[in-house]
């Protein structure tokens, strides 16, 4: 019954030009245009999901549907892809925002700083200024979320959830020690390998490989990203990953302290990107903060098998805030 309910939830797909980059936005719920909707039925709050890396928004659809259902279908749940991580199909129209006063291209939009500005540009041009926000950042999306709050302190954010937050010492983590040489020293080898393997590969074979892989990982849905194996997207995933290893080093305690009352940190006990000691350190430094350690063995990539459990935690945490909306 629960799975049937989720299938009935409407999800609208758009490709927009944001900061000069093609961007996939998946919108859960009947609201597709909050900026120009002046009706009394327009929701007062948006739940906005910022993915990890790779930033394929389609991976988060089951999680978004679960969260939408658990919040009684009262609020839209939107997922944004990272710039350069999704390409529109040839038959798909790419929407442009004529009202964007910041329509110029964002410098180094595929890098760490550019991705932060990319999300802020989207909110400026597609979400009314007076609309309340719940931000949900996963992995490097947590870093983006924290930096968005820092750069635009007056964003109307009532809560921000940082899930498996890679906000410090990424290259020192168990996975980081493996990823750093690959992404920083051998990045161009990865680029060349991806190009040589996948550029000449027929679309039917790539689609088959992607669908089979997504089925195995329980990630296949109506918006399965069939351009995962595009060399352009793979190069941008690796480029962002390399910057993460080099630049996500010191925890931004100033930003955390300034916005602590809005933040919920959720660490896993089995996360090779954020080992338990990172949780212990931040818990010691911010004992008054809402900093939690998962007791359900949910892994870093919770979107593979633990969408419902993560959605349950967030919906339960939001009950008091949403009851006032």
Image: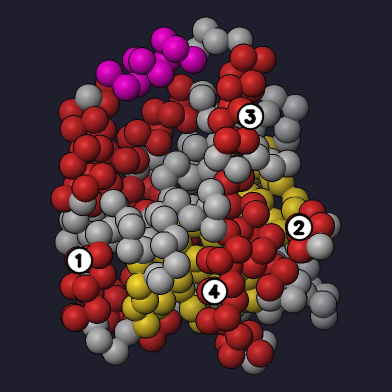
Among the two numbered marks 4 and 2 on one chain, the one whose residue lies closer to the N terminus: 2
Residue at horizontal 62 percent and vertical 14 percent from the top:
205
143 horizontally vs 210: left or right: left
> What residue sits right under mark 1 in the picture?
277
Contact between marks 2 and 3 (CB within 8 A): the answer is no
Please tell me which residue lies in front, 219 or 79.
219
Q: Is residue 13 above or below residue 65?
A: above
Q: Which residues are magenta?
A: 189-198
Res. 314 mark: 4
Q: Residues within 10 Å of mark 4 (few under 14, many from 20)?
A: some
Say whether marks 1 and 4 touch (CB < 8 Å): no
Circle 2 packing at 10 Å, graded few (<14), some (14-19), many (20+), is: few
Q: Is residue 197 magenta?
A: yes
Residue topped by disc 3? 211
Q: Quadrant of residue 246?
A: top left
Label 3 packing within 10 angstroms: few (<14), some (14-19), many (20+): some
Quarter holding the C terminus is bottom right
Count of residue discs: 4
Residue at the image point whose x is 27% and y is 18% from the top: 189
As measured in the structure, the alpha-carbon distance from the residue carrying label 2 to the one carrying label 1 is: 37 Å
Which tag, 2 or 1, sits closer to the chain's start? 2
Sequence-wise, the earlier of marks 4 and 3 is 3
Q: Give me the residue at 41% from left, 18% from top.
A: 194
């Amino acid at each position: 019954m629960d799975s049937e309910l989720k299938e009935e939830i409407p999800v609208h797909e758009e490709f927009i030009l944001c900061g000069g980059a093609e961007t996939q936005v998946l919108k859960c719920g009947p609201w597709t245009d909050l900026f120009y909707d002046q009706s009394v039925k327009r929701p007062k709050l948006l739940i906005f999901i910022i993915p990890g890396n790779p930033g394929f928004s389609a991976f988060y659809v089951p999680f978004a549907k679960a969260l939408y259902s658990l919040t009684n279908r009262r609020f839209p749940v939107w997922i944004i892809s990272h710039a350069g991580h999704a390409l529109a199909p040839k038959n798909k129209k790419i929407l442009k925002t004529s009202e964007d006063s910041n329509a110029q291209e964002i410098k180094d939009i595929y890098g760490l700083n550019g991705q932060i500005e990319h999300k802020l540009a989207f909110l400026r041009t597609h979400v009314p200024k007076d609309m309340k926000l719940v931000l949900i950042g996963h992995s490097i999306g947590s870093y983006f979320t924290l930096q968005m709050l820092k750069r635009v302190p007056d964003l109307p954010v009532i809560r921000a959830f940082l899930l498996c937050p890679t906000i410090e010492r990424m290259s020192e983590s168990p996975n980081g020690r493996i990823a750093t040489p690959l992404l920083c020293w051998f990045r161009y080898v990865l680029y060349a390998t991806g190009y040589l393997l996948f550029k000449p590969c027929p679309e039917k074979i790539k689609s088959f490989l992607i669908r089979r892989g997504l089925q195995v990982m329980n990630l296949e849905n109506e918006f399965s990203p069939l351009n995962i194996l595009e060399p352009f997207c793979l190069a941008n995933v690796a480029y962002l990953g390399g910057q993460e290893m080099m630049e996500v080093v010191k925890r931004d305690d100033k930003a955390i302290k300034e916005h602590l009352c809005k933040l919920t940190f959720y660490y896993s006990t089995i996360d090779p990107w954020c080992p338990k000691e990172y949780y212990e350190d931040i818990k010691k430094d911010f004992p008054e903060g809402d900093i939690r350690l998962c007791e359900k063995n949910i892994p870093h990539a919770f979107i593979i098998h633990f969408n419902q459990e993560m959605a349950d935690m967030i919906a339960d945490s939001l009950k008091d805030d949403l009851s006032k909306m």
